[in-house]
Amino acid sequence: MSFSTNYSFRESSIFDIRTLIEALRIIIINAILAVIFLFLIMEEIDWTLFSSRENITDITIDKTSWNINFF
């Protein structure tokens, strides 16, 4: 009686279509988020430049929880 120590298996490709679609999905989602954050940053920079050039004398009262100057 002899025992076989060989294990036969089918080698699968690392880059199958499912993995490729999942990688593309992650890349597209991150690209969309990057564009959104880019426009948010550009808007903040624009507002900072505008408010520094103009003599704005309006008094704003912001008692919301996300106001960093409230405390």
Image: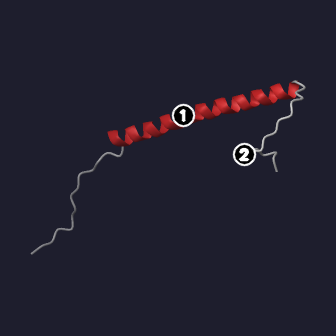
Where does residue 28 sit, x and y in percent of width and height? 48, 34
* Residue nearer the viewer, 67 or 17: 67
Q: Which quarter shows the N terminus? A: bottom left
Where does residue 57 sit, x and y in percent of width and height? 90, 29
Question: Residue 45 occupies which quadrant of the picture?
Answer: top right
The residue carrying mark 1 is 31
Question: Residue 20 occupies which quadrant of the picture?
Answer: top left
Q: Residue at position x 73%, y 44% from top?
A: 64
55 up-or-down from 26: above or below: above
The residue carrying mark 2 is 66
Where does residue 52 sit, x and y in percent of width and height? 86, 29
Q: Secondary structure at mark 2?
A: loop
Residue type, numbered disc 2:
Trp
* Res. 22 in view: yes
Q: Are marks 1 and 2 in contact (CB under 8 Å)?
A: no
Q: Residue at position x 54%, y 33% from top?
A: 32
